[in-house]
Amino acid sequence: MTYNIDRNLKYHAPDKYQMPRYNALREAARVYAEAILRDCPDSRERSLALTNLEQSVMWANAAIARDGY
């Protein structure tokens, strides 16, 4: 497997077609984060769930930025 430096490490300016998709992902993540905060006790597990949700949004955004469509 070849590491694609240009694809993976450059800035990908969003276009008008990507912005609604970024916003939809962020809104869905917000709803889920609110459910986690509401329904899960304050704990390491809750912190990990929120951290991994943030990470999931980041990787989903990277998929949109890098591969577009």
Image (cartoon, rainbow, N blue to C red):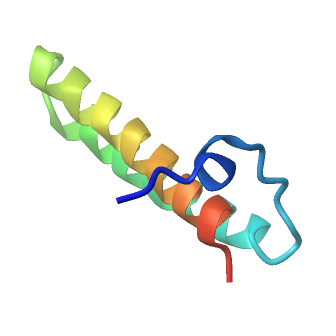
Tell which of 24 and 60 is nearer to you. 60
Examine the rendered structure and indicate whether residue 14 appears above or below residue 51: below
Q: Which residue is drawn at 43% across and 56% down?
A: 2
Left or right: 44 in relation to 36? left
Q: Residue 6: image x %, image y %?
A: 69, 50
Q: Which residue is drawn at 80% across and 78% down?
A: 17
Whether residue 52 is visible? yes
Tell which of 45 and 31 is nearer to you. 45
Is the N terminus in the top left, top right, bottom left or bottom right quadrant? bottom left
Q: Quadrant of residue 33?
A: top left
Q: Residue at x 26, y 40 (%)?
A: 36
Q: Residue 49: image x %, image y %?
A: 22, 35
Tell which of 12 and 39 is nearer to you. 12
Q: Residue 15: image x %, image y %?
A: 86, 68
Whether residue 24 is visible? no
Tell which of 7 and 39 is nearer to you. 7
Left or right: 7 in relation to 42? right
Q: Residue at x 13, y 16 (%)?
A: 44
Total numbered badges shown on the rendered structure: 0
Examine the rendered structure and indicate whether residue 11 appears above or below residue 42: below
Is the C terminus in the top left, top right, bottom left or bottom right quadrant? bottom right
Q: Residue 58: image x %, image y %?
A: 50, 45
